[in-house]
Image (cartoon, rainbow, N blue to C red):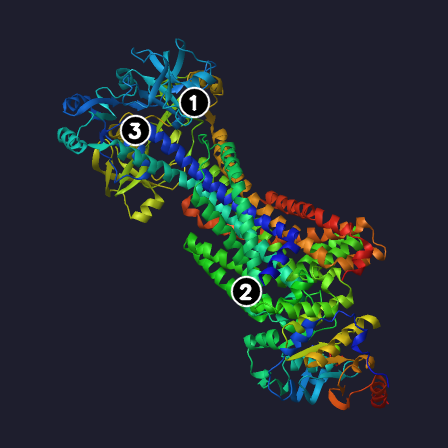
Amino acid sequence: MRRVTVRGLLARKLRLALTALAIVLGVTFVSGTLVLGDTLNRTFDDLIGTAYQHVSFQIRGKAAFGNNNATAVNSTADRKPIPESIAAAVRRVPGVAYAFGSVGGYAQFMARDGSAIGKGGTSTLGFSFDPNPQLSPYRLLQGRAPTAAEDVVMDKATAAKYHFAVGERVLVDLPDRPQTFTISGLVTFGSDNNLAGVTLAGFDPPTAQALFNSRGYYNTISVLAAPGADTVKLQRAIAAILPAGAEVVSGQTVASELSTAVNNGLSFISTALLIFALVSLFVGGFTIFNTFSITVGQRTRELALLRLVGASRRQVFRSVVGEAAVTGLIASLVGLGLGILAALGLKALLKAFGIALPSAPLVFEARTAVVAIAVGVGVALLSALIPARRAVRIPPVAALVEQSEVETVLVRRRQVIAGIAMVLVGVVAFVAGLTKPDIVLVGVGALAILVARGLLLPLVARPLSSALGRPLARLLGTPGQLGRENATRNPRRTAQTATALMIGLSLVSTIAVLGASLSSSAKNSVDSALSADYIVSGKGGFSKSVVADVSRLPGVTTTTVVYQGRFEVRGSLSTLVAASPAELSRTVTLHTTAGTGAPAMAAGELLVDTNTADADHLHIGSTVPVKFAQTGPTTMRIGGIFKANPLLGSYLTGDGFFLSHFDNPLPIAVLLSRAPGDHGLDGALGRALKPYANVSFKTRAQFEASQQASVNQLLGLVYVLLALAILIALIGIVNALMLSVFERTHEIGLLRAVGMKRRQVRAMIRSESVIIALFGAVVGLVIGTLVGVALASSLRNKGVTNVAVPLPSLIGFLVLSALLGLGAATWPARRAANLDVLAAVAAE
Amino acid sequence: MTAPRVPHTLPAMLTNSLEAAMALTSKRSDGPAARALDLIKTYGTGEVEVRALDGVSVEFERGRFTAVMGPSGSGKSTLMHCMAGLDAPSSGSAFVGDDEIGRLDDAGLTELRRDRIGFVFQSFNLVPTLSAAENITLPADLAGETVEREWFDALVVQLGIAERLSHRPGELSGGQQQRVACARALIGRPELIFADEPTGNLDSNASAEVLEFLRRAANEHGQSIAMVTHDPLAAAYADRVLFLADGKVVGELSSPSADAVLAHVRRLGG
Ligand SMILES: Nc1ncnc2c1ncn2[C@@H]1O[C@H](COP(=O)(O)OP(=O)(O)O)[C@@H](O)[C@H]1O
Ligand SMILES: [Mg+2]
């Protein structure tokens, strides 16, 4: 029997290759994602390893919030600084060979043309340069260490790319204001030219303390133990001289905390990509299922003959499933190989959508191979189960009867009942989910509807494809009419063939609706929250001098400075937004439902949004426990409740209160309003912001557009990732058409014999393909739109205030589907048209 | 009265191994190889009901070559299907040896077909993706057994397909395909071979080769054979001919000549 399986595989090489392609693509995606994830993890682990290679201990402030949650670990802002005096004390501890206190912060190099170097925000690092190479991961490559207040060392990558040399001057934007420095030397990070794409600006330690507002303090102190020192004792000895609120941990601990945090952050990207990979595999599974269903149908006589001469049911089952397993295995291996290319492609894709990642040699873990093969073979096996069950039900006598090619519409009652039951369950879950609203219930409902669709689809396949085919038949005459009949002659097959495309398009349209709703909600939230004429913002925080520079421009009537920081409220970590309350109403619209807005902020009270107030049962006058990294726990009085708006966040307070609880925070935005009738502000603002290369201003309309653009960019990325699923669905259509052409060889030969032209044969096959694609697209779009609307409505509490259906996009998808269907038919149509008439007529 | 063509018209390839193989033949109990008791088979219900078998009781004797004749639609194939366990009769019972087919489950029926029955049909006898040799050994392969090498060699030589063993069915003529099917039917020394119009698609020369082979198998190895045909010439190769019409047994001839069969057919038809 194994021989029969193997021979069968060889005899159907082409068809299986097409089937396998679906798995190849899915597995490529999966293994590419895994390789990319491992590569990034390894890269960051190596970097962290370099940074802490020689550090025996690190002294730092205790984490303010809970234990090491992913972001808290890395953020010095969540730890209290260490007084300078401790460093001196630590150096005196016996067994300590060397200790270095460091500070760090925002330091943005400017290119000669005044533009910011790098991507701003977190991709710049300013730090205090340790001239002693024993501890420091930085290596001085050229020049000398910074020793004076105007010295800076620059990473080699920046120097090379922007043509800076030792001795030249460079402008650096800093927390307080931009300043010009002299490049005293060039550095590398370990052996890398920069820190995974982050630019490096190293200053003389006292200068760094001054620049980063840390006079008299360090963020951390790194300690090098003397050779042969007992590290356990040493750590205890250091701990003994530390004040409360500071701790000493081993360099390894810091390194592993950091890599855990980075890996957690990266796993988000991997998970997102894996979801799309699984969607592709899911769609691929349907195309495989369809191919195997059709082949089992076509092999009915052969399988019956095997049963006749003594093959047991189990043997037939194994042969079909075995064929799937071998196909899956080969496809997985190919996909695994291509996965490496995919990793590069995914990286390029993420980069194209603004997610830059460091470059490094790819890492191929054994786990990747295991997962890829398990997933590929698993999908193939699962998809073959139902066809294999059908195969074992073929009675041996079937070998003795001429096979009727046209399958009667077999509507099984069980299927209809199950389908209707699923629809009911789906709708109930859906509606319940919407009214609650509960996204899980909505999801369950959507899933049930998807399954029901699979069960009921064959029933609508005939009338719907027939209707869709009518214009084609009218347009193309007989070939179109024949194509239409071919598409409707076996509704079950049509439905199965279209299912993959249907799933793909329902996902696409769900996303489209969700995206349009998000985009329109973003506009809406800007409209209802902002009354400022200009929004000045940077990538991350920017120098405080920006505030002074813009607020003194003539024509500016109100300046609102916005800060943002992390704090713990009622035991959970949240974001606190602060704004200067003076004339707040001219820049920010707070729809307060209780209490006051600006006055409460000015009084240092907490304002919460309606969602939070409802969920936590907060009222005006309630006091809530809060905790700040620098100042510790305290309480805040609720002074106002405002209508929820994603732009404002959930917690607001005045800048006075904020500044007294955060250590030198940087403004993240400045909101300006101008005198009525004053139009000349654009030019003045541009000039004022010229020195701050990473700070820009937008009018309210521009800001709105940029908010929408970021939604659309994400949408674009999702479309690209879903495109693979659509591609796989198309392969499924190609495959099914090839099988149909093969099975109708005799019939096509007859048509040719009685005078059908090649061109007409092609038109016939193309019509069939377009009808199937349109059928899949129509059902997919309808369902996807419904699901999208439902999802968007259920997210009302999460800031999706508007539900929008992007009709032009949806119509575009429909047209695109028809074109893709036309494309999918190319090869099968050519094959059908090129059949040898004589041989085709003779074919059984 | 023309006697069936005698074996010496076959290629003189008969080897000693064939005789040696014959010596190994059956140690089975007496009694018929297969029998049917009052088989009734109806298709459809009501208006469209067709009585394909209408109380058929037959015995296929062990070691003999029995032909079942009758016009098209008389129920010949249905009878064969019911007796081979391929189809279930509406009532009545069928036995292979002492085993009642109706009592066997799917696994039992599978083993019955694989180990105790050989089949030759009018067409589509062979798995298209397997070579001739692989088709012949298919039942043994399915059972996980090996074929008797000598028996295999003797069969393919006698059937004149020794040179074609590596060919796929698509590369063989109709006659060659049927001879490969005969080899497959015989390779496992089944208790009974069912052949349904095995020469239906063949020209007279190819037919004669297949029929002569079946005749020899009965003569020389005591192979029990039940063959359905509507061709009097083919029926004349059998030891005994049963006549079927409208689902009933309507006559029987022993050691018939083609003329006698034809005469009988005429009499029934007239
Ligand atoms: N699967 C079936 N369904 C309905 N009628 C059938 C079926 N198989 C056979 N018949 C009918 O039973 C009768 C006997 O058929 P069959 O045994 O094939 O005849 P024969 O082989 O002698 O030509 C015929 O009338 C035929 O139409
Ligand atoms: Mg028949």
Amino acid type for the residue under numbered disc 2: Gly
Q: Is residue B257 above or below residue A499?
A: below
Discs 2, 1: same chain: yes
A193 on left or right of B103: left
Q: Is residue B180 above or below residue A465?
A: below
- Disc on the earlier residue, 1 or 3: 3
Question: Secondary structure under badge 1?
Answer: loop
Chain under numbered label 1: A
Task: Give the label, 3 or 2, closer to the camera.
Answer: 3
Distance between the alpha carbons at the discs numbered 1 and 3: 31 Å
Q: In front here: A52 or B102? A: B102
Discs 1, 3: same chain: yes
Neighbour tally class for label 3: few under 14, some 14-19, many 20 plus, Cα within 10 Å: many
Distance between the alpha carbons at the discs numbered 3 and 2: 60 Å
Q: Is residue A729 above or below residue A256?
A: below
Amino acid type for the residue under numbered disc 1: Asn
Q: How far from the left and from the top, in percent, is residue A418?
A: 53, 67
Q: Which residue is mark 1?
A: A694
Labelled disc at residue A52: 3
A314 on left or right of A435: right
- Disc on the earlier residue, 2 or 1: 2
Chain under numbered label 2: A
Question: Secondary structure under badge 2?
Answer: helix
